[in-house]
Amino acid sequence: MKVKTISIAGLTASAVIGLSGAFSTSAQTPAGITRTMLLKQDSSIAGREGVIASVVLAPGAAEGRHTHHADVYGYVIEGSATIEKSGSPTVTLHAGEVFYIAAGVVHQGINNGKVPAKVVAVFVAEKGQPLTTPAK
């Protein structure tokens, strides 16, 4: 079996264009946040799709409280990100650490550091729904 290794930079270069609107029901992405869709693929799970995204939070940036129609699995590649999640203690994660956010849980990522925080997120999403919805 051949396994092709590609860098995150390579994935970003081949990002799916035109799908950024799927991230939010709002047309605005918060200042200092860059979200790039890397892959969107139907799942073998009925009514679900897999999505891989790169998220970069500039120093001082906050995503704003939001939810997903998806379970989210994340990996911090560089820097550190603080995750505020309803019903859980606030945590600061550093490069090499992972996190999980259940579908429907209100949360936000914040970069309290001095360098950009780079995260890769994998969504097991409800097909046909926006990935990110601002919390009320």
Image (cartoon, grey):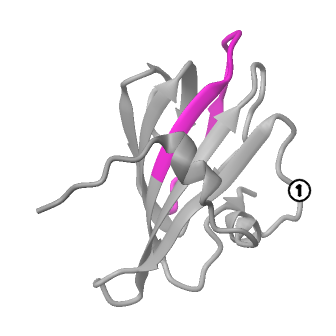
Dot 1: what SS?
Answer: loop
Q: Is residue 23 above or below residue 95?
A: below
Q: Which residues are magenta?
A: 104-121
Q: Quadrant of the C terminus?
A: bottom right
- On the question of residue 85 being in view, the answer is no
Q: Residue at x 37, y 24 (%)?
A: 96
Q: Position of residue 129 (x, y in %)?
A: 61, 79
The residue that mark 1 highlights is 28
Q: Amino acid at mark 1?
A: Gln
Q: Residue at x 62, y 43 (%)?
A: 55
Q: Residue furthest left?
A: 1
Q: Is residue 74 left or right of residue 33?
A: left
Q: Residue at x 51, y 66 (%)?
A: 39
Q: Is residue 127 above or below residue 96?
A: below
Instruction: Assess disc 1: are there few (<14), some (14-19) or many (≥20) residues with their C-alpha within 10 Å of its C-alpha.
Output: few
In the image, is residue 119 part of the stretch drawn in magenta?
A: yes
Q: Quadrant of the N terminus?
A: bottom left
**Observer-nearest of 67 and 116:** 116
